[in-house]
Amino acid sequence: MSNLRTAAIVVAALASAPAAGLASPRPDMTQPKAGAAAVASSKQTMHATKGIVKSMDSTTLVIRRSPSGRDMRFALNPSTQREGNVKVGSTVEVRYRNEGNRRVATVVAAAQ
């Protein structure tokens, strides 16, 4: 009788172990992790173009890509790198990223 009771307790314990595992909380895989947004924003697509400087001040650069082309406007900020003698009338290469509806120049380099 004692062996039967021991066997019943062991079987009951083994039967409830997998059920306990099913009741444990699982991570929600449908929601992105908190750090995912920061990683996505740091991987912004960079673009490049070339044109002639039409106007420039401390916060804005406007270039014309070709004589019959449209103007492109870029926001400049303190982190924008300027290489060479960039002035009105000079040919420049601009590397930039889109932030909302603005183009933010990261590098403005006078063409050689």
Image: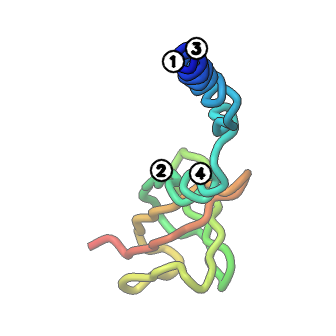
Task: Classify residue 34 as left or right of residue 93.
Answer: right
- Mark 4 / mark 1, whichever is N-terminal: 1
Amino acid type for the residue under numbered disc 3: Met
Residue of label 4: 36
In this view, the residue in front, 110 or 20, is 20
Q: Residues within 10 Å of mark 3 (few under 14, many from 20)?
A: few
Q: Which residue is located at x 58 percent, y 68 percent? A: 54
Point out residue 3 in the picture as x, y percentages from the top left corner. Answer: 51, 18
In the image, which disc is placed on residue 1? 3
Distance in Å between CA atoms under marks 3 and 2 = 98 Å
Q: Secondary structure at mark 4?
A: helix
Q: Which residue is located at x 60 percent, y 23 percent? A: 9
Between label 3 and label 2, give the one nearer the viewer.
3
Q: Are marks 2 and 1 in contact (CB under 8 Å)?
A: no
In the image, which disc is placed on residue 3? 1
Q: Are marks 1 and 3 in contact (CB under 8 Å)?
A: yes
Residue of label 2: 66
Amino acid type for the residue under numbered disc 4: Ala
Point out residue 82 in the picture as x, y percentages from the top left corner. Answer: 45, 82
- Mark 4 / mark 2, whichever is N-terminal: 4
Q: Which residue is located at x 60 percent, y 18 percent? A: 5
Does residue 87 appear in this view?
Answer: yes
Q: Is residue 21 above or below residue 46?
A: above
Q: Are marks 4 and 2 in contact (CB under 8 Å)?
A: no
Q: Residues within 10 Å of mark 4 (few under 14, many from 20)?
A: few
Amino acid type for the residue under numbered disc 1: Asn
